[in-house]
Image (tube, rainbow, N blue to C red):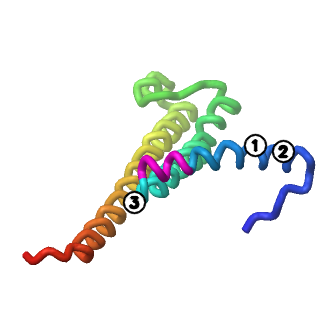
Amino acid sequence: MTQPPQTPWGRRIEKIIENIWEPLDLIGQKLLGSLWRTFYESVQDAIALSLLLQIPSLIGKVIIGKEFSSYDVCLAENALGSSRYACFIIVTSDFLLWVVLAGRILGRFIVDFKSLWSNNRGNNNDPP
């Protein structure tokens, strides 16, 4: 459990987030039911992973002074320069973000589907 905020600004921000989250949570539960938890966990994963994997891109912008968006841009760099290899690393990390996100979302979907399938089969009282 997290500690409550100690500063007045921290308490205000926590109250604002609670005022936003409570109705959003109720709407999500009513619209999506048991899938709501999976949905918001997937969104949290996407936000966290995108922030973490933007670090190489930020380093490229700050240290090298260039923004790398695709492998085409990497190939235009000098073959002997370090910026070419940094570009490959940055573009690959951005690609891996989507691979990890897709894997986590697919994994959650499969787990939820299996639990829904087993609950449906267990609650079915009709003869075969």
Q: Residues within 10 Å of mark 2 (few under 14, many from 20)?
A: few
* Span of residues in magenta: 26-32
For label 1, the residue is 16
Residue 94 point in image, percent of width and height: 49, 40
Q: Nearer the viewer, mark 1 or mark 3?
A: 1
Q: Amino acid at mark 3?
A: Arg
Circle 3: element type: helix
User: In whole angstroms, how far apart are the C-alphas of marks 1 and 3?
Assistant: 30 Å
C-alpha distance separating marks 2 and 3: 34 Å
Kindly check if marks 2 and 1 are in contact, taking CB atoms under 8 A apart as contact.
yes
Q: Which residue in the protein does label 3 denote? A: 108
Residue 37 shown left or right of residue 57 in the figure = left
Which quadrant holds the C terminus? bottom left
Give me the residue at 92% from left, 47% from top.
8
Q: Give 69 or 5, whichever is nearer the viewer.
A: 5
Disc on the earlier residue, 2 or 3: 2
Residue 78: x, y in percent?
A: 50, 25
- Judged by its main secondary structure, the magenta piece is helix
Tell me the number on the disc at residue 25.
Answer: none
Residue receiving disc 2: 12
Q: How many marks?
A: 3
